[in-house]
């Protein structure tokens, strides 16, 4: 009988932590090798973590929505027989303890928590006027720490101790190497020697934590109110949008484009396409025209690393395509779009969209974007002001195509198809003049689609 410590694996280059978005097991569950344990999400992908061994789940590291560092213990699995990398209880490497809870002191210069100097129980009882905390005469003595350093305890024991306001720093463990167990917590409870997170014997009023949220945010939900924890992809989107708006001075330029000829060309192309070809939308044609335009305007196909103080411009257009899914907005990448045909682009868009909807995108599918295009298709509205995907410096937003009457040379009304096209730019590296000139060149290509295929 032993224990297997399954640590959060290295999910990808540069990834230092992952959010556990879903647990598929609970403490006490029996798992088989390759059975799903949890879903982990990084800023690059969401993956399913599976059990490397057969056994029983003894502990899990965190709750859904919590961030876990790469290399930290995800679950502890009790195993039977000889298992590679099996760890006996006595050899378990303790998890790094969480920072001590802030403690108020009558002297602000005193440390918040001292392992060997616990407030005497009689002082606490006198201060709060409660006899219920007096130790019962028949209860066993509580073990005391005999050495300095962090207390040894499993994540489950630490979590329970925090919930019970028990200070592990002052408690000795009866397990191997002084490890604190659930039995030690039970003994502490029976003796009444629990230590409050903030001692009641302090005569000075406790100061509120600087980061404590307003009372209105911590009150219980009101009737008719539904609270939804922000986790997973929605949390990542929220953080990125906040960072982008905080760090990037946006401006958006909008131009109206006549796409009547482009739509006619698209219709003819669909009639002549093979049975295995995807339906050609306006998006592949737009991407093809954009890739040609940005050859003359490389400052839009770039990333600004403001902390390091330089801009990287790229020869290849790796275009992120913002895709709406049930989980939220995902941005897979069409690689080297400038060297693809319109049919290749259409195939790639269809493949990425399906993989995004089914949560089967690979790590490669989500990496390397040099700029982004976001489109809601028929729901695109008249004008959009998209938010830049930092550290990129621009994001393009075609809006829906609408039919409008415009006068011809004689003044007679003629029905045309029009589309507004938006580009949001980082004003630190792109000027409004550049945006206007770039979009004017793009408009010329789209209004005369034959020119797209002459270059």
Image (spheres, rainbow, N blue to C red):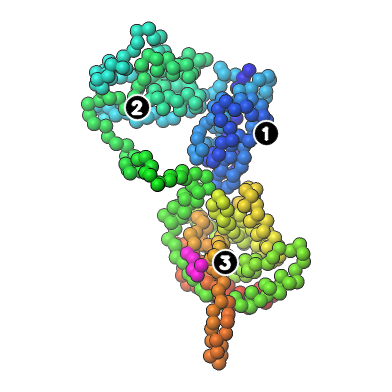
Picture quadrant where residue 22 is located: top right
Q: Mark 1 points at which residue?
A: 34
Give the x, y percent position of residue 27. 55, 27
Q: Which mark is residue 378?
A: 3
| Cα–Cα span, label 2 and label 1 | 41 Å
User: Is residue 134 one of those drawn in magenta?
Assistant: no
Q: Which residue is drawn at 55% across and 69% down?
A: 400
User: Is 210 above or below relative to 427?
Assistant: above
Dot placed on the residue nearer the N-terminal end, 2 or 1: 1
Question: Within 10 angstroms of label 1, few (less than 14), some, or many (20 or more) residues?
Answer: few
The crowding category of the residue bearing disc 2, from other C-alpha atoms within 10 Å (few below 14, some 14 to 19, many at least 20), is some
Q: State how far apart marks 3 and 2 are (Cα).
A: 56 Å
* Residue 337 in which image quadrant: bottom right
Query: Circle 3 — which element?
Result: helix
Q: Position of residue 129 (x, y in %)?
A: 24, 20
Between discs 3 and 2, the one toward the N terminus: 2
């Amino acid at each position: 009988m032993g224990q297997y410590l399954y640590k959060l694996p290295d999910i990808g280059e540069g990834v230092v932590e992952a959010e556990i978005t879903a647990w598929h097991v609970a403490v006490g569950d029996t798992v088989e090798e390759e059975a799903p344990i949890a879903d982990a999400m990084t800023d690059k992908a969401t993956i399913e973590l599976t059990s490397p061994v057969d056994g029983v789940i003894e502990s899990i590291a965190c709750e859904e929505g919590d961030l876990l560092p790469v290399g930290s213990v995800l679950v502890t699995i009790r195993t039977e027989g000889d298992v590679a990398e099996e760890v006996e209880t006595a050899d378990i490497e303790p998890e790094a303890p969480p920072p001590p809870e802030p403690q108020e002191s009558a002297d602000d210069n005193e440390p918040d928590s001292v392992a060997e100097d616990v407030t005497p129980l009689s002082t606490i009882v006198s201060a709060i006027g409660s006899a219920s905390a007096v130790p019962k005469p028949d209860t066993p003595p509580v073990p005391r720490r005999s050495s300095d350093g962090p207390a040894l305890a499993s994540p489950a024991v630490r979590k329970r101790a925090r919930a019970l306001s028990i200070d592990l720093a002052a408690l000795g463990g009866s397990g191997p190497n002084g490890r604190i167990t659930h039995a030690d917590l039970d003994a502490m409870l029976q003796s009444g020697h629990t230590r409050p997170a903030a001692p009641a014997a302090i005569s000075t009023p406790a100061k509120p934590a600087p980061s404590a949220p307003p009372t209105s945010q911590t009150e219980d939900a009101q009737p008719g109110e539904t609270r939804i924890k922000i986790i997973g992809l929605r949390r990542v989107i929220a953080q990125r949008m906040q960072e982008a708006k905080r760090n990037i001075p946006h401006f958006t330029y909008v131009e109206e484009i006549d796409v009547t000829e482009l739509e006619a060309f698209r219709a003819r192309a669909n009639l002549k396409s093979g049975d295995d070809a995807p339906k050609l939308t306006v998006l592949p044609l737009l991407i093809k025209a954009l890739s040609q335009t940005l050859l003359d305007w490389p400052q839009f196909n770039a990333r600004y690393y403001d902390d390091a103080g330089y801009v990287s411009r790229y020869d290849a257009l790796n275009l992120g395509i913002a895709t709406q899914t049930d989980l939220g907005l995902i941005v897979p990448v069409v690689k080297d779009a400038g060297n693809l045909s319109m049919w290749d682009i259409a195939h790639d868009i269809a493949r990425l969209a399906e993989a995004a909807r089914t949560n089967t995108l690979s790590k490669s599918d989500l990496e390397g974007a040099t700029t982004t295009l976001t489109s809601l298709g028929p729901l695109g509205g008249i004008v959009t002001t998209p938010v830049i995907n930092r550290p990129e410096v621009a994001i393009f937003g075609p809006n829906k195509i609408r039919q409008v009457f415009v006068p011809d040379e004689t003044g007679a009304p003629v029905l045309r198809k029009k589309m507004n096209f938006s580009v949001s730019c980082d004003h630190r590296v792109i000027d409004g003049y550049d945006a206007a000139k770039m979009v004017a060149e793009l408009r010329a290509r789209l209004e005369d689609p034959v020119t797209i295929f002459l270059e």
